[in-house]
Amino acid sequence: MTFADYPGHLVALGLTLAAAAVVLVAFRAGPLQTPQRNRYRRLLAALHYAAILLMLVILWNPSAWQEEETFGKNTVLAVFDTSESMSVADDGRQSRLDRSLSRFVECFDKPGGDGPQYRVYGFDDRAYHCGSADLLRRWGSRSNLHEAVSLTADCVARDAQSPTQDEPTGVVILTDGRADDRDSRRYLPALREDLPILIVGVGARSPRPDLAVETLLSPAAAWVDTTYDVGVVVSAAGVPNAPVTLELLCDNDVVEKRQIDRETFKADGAGPAQATLRFTVPAQGLGVHVLTARVQPGRGEINLGNNARTTSVEVMQERPMRVLLYSQRADFNIGKIRQALSRDKHIRLDLGFDVIKNKPLSDRATRATGYVTLADLDASRSEYDVIIKGACGVGFERSDSYDFFAKRGGAMILLPGETVQTLATDSQERGLSTLPVLFSRQEQGAFPTTAVLSPARVWPPQRDAIKLSFEAEIAHVFDPSVFAESQYRVSPYYGIAATKPAATTLAMVGDTPIVSVHRVGRGRVCLLNISKLFTLYREDRQGGALSELMCGLVAYLGRTPAQGANVELFAERVAEDPRRVQFNAYIMDKSFLPAPGANVLLTAGEQVVSMEPTGRGYYRATLDWGSGQSVVAKAQAELNGSFLGERTLATTLPAVRDEMSCVDLDEPFLRSLAERMKARYIHIDDLSEKAAEIFESRRQVGTIEKVTSIWPRWPLLVVLCLLLSTGWFIRRAIGLV
């Protein structure tokens, strides 16, 4: 205790002595000297002196140091899932997010309540702080629950390094569990076991009926005035009893309607039952057309976000392929192949002969027919898409012949050689390496080192039916019905042991490959191992099997057009965001070397952007593409004012499993996540006010030290009153009052 208004020892001593002197003088008065009153004189003096001392003490303000604890409200993180699946109204009236907000107010953040204060966050693709539940951004494209878990870990780790009064003391997460990644082992574990975390599952516990268009598959591009196929896969969670109507729209106009019966849905494993339908759509009008597959919602269906899927198809004018047919010998094979290719309006055929030996006759024939030798075509060789070499050696003595397919990316079809050993005994090692087959070996001598290449000619020829390989069927290279006719029976020209490991066999006769293809550099080389090709020609059937064989091979191999030989273009979905598509281009100069510093323009749909360089000859651009599966894009490149070329890419991307593909509450995942985070899981239907009791409402944030006067107390007042009253009664008793 201390005296706040203490006047000092000298003054205090003077006051006490003066009071004592006054009291002594006062109580030595004559009326107190009588024998009856004398015995009370000292008691009265002591009582009055005590009262005076008590009044002096009160005037000096006796005080004491006191410590008071200060308390503040705890902070709890309230994290709401605001992705698109939270827009579903399970009860048909209130969305999941709105229900979460109302239950949150009822059980946690009551107006005027004594509970903790809640800091509101939302998360979809990214977690964000909004300050108030009214400012939540609704219906994000995806639910990234990693962001919500990382937000908790970041706040705890940050406050552990620099503790503040706003350090979170609890977390409540309200979500339906429809996250992109539902493997709880990939989520961060709890950083503090003493931090209470509550995960609230939002949504109906029982699965609801749901019809969804899982896949809408169509070609990215189609030729005008033709037809193309469209495939649609419809899934049903809870197969409806009534038929389901599926509509296919083109540019918002209904093309066709189909009824899907209950029997059409086929269940495969634990997933929903699926029905697959195919449509044939005419390609009319140049340009980009939007296809939409839409299924009518069933009774009681709450998720309408997956009832439609959209893609696009670009209808283009056909580009004829430039093909060169070259031979050093005129025979029936060359003639019939020329007739078969000339029938195809998609092929622009040039014929090259190197046969005539008489110079005057050769000059006259050249001027009359336009036939030229292969050497004369070297300057314009890169303008062709496919070169067909007839009865001649492989002949890659000139580097530009090899560069045609190895660097330029062209395709070459090799017909059987002029003699049995023409291809197999080619003196050029580069020529042998380009063949897609391995000829059989016959050992000459006792040691394998004396072995030489010697393809055995099948003679007499064993004619048999043509069998298409599995690779040819899935790639739709040929029409199987054409080769199924019994009159098309051929024999192989070479007795080939096997194709090379990286080669592809498209057709066989017995066990012998007759059409083999493999890659050489950027291009492809094909060997037609068929004897007497001309026997496959049928004039009465538009060329017959020979036309199907040659035209199919040209279309299959000629994938690198002349104008796009210097440009490669690829497209893929971005792993982090499947709704974005990344385009990568590889640009080469006229010598087919990487071209740094080129200007590359990308046209995809209605978007035109410049591609940024990422490496020597590599360029990249990323565009928002949505859930569409078809992509038609064109890359154009120029370098130092010289146009290098352009490449058109038409491809189909895998379907996007977006947020609304399935919206059922995933309770097993949320329970496993709660176990991983050492949290508590509760369904929103079981939520009550007791759930908020796991969060402490307040905590001590500090102490306040202050000097407080201690005299205004009831005991002190009672003592003073007793002293004065006792003195008064004694004085009255002895007759002084």
Image (tube, grey):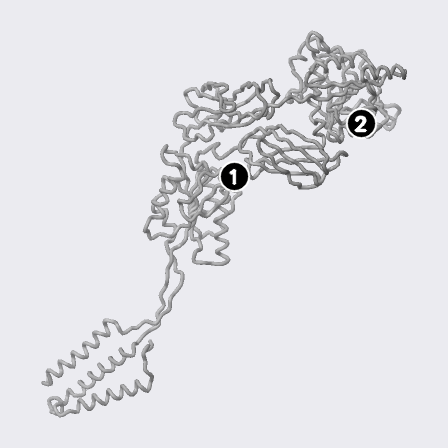
715 left or right, relative to 445: left
Q: Nearer the viewer, mark 2 or mark 1?
A: 2
Q: Badge 1 is on which residue? A: 181
| First reached walking from the N terminus: tag 2 or tag 1 | 1
Residue at figure coordinates x 49%, y 50% from the top left: 153
Instruction: Tell me the crowding category of disc 1: few under 14, some 14 to 19, or many 20 or more residues within 10 angstroms, Cα based.
Output: some
Q: Nearer the viewer, residue 406 or 416?
A: 406
Q: Quadrant of the N terminus?
A: bottom left
What's the distance in space between the residues labelled 2 and 1, CA to CA? Answer: 56 Å
Corner quadrant of residue 7:
bottom left
Residue 573: % across, % down: 58, 35
Asked whether the viewer can see residue 266, the reply is no
Q: Nearer the viewer, residue 645 or 177?
A: 645
**Label 2 close to label 1 by CB (< 8 Å):** no
Label 2 is placed on what type of residue? Ala
Q: Is residue 562 above or below residue 689?
A: above
Residue 363: % across, % down: 87, 17
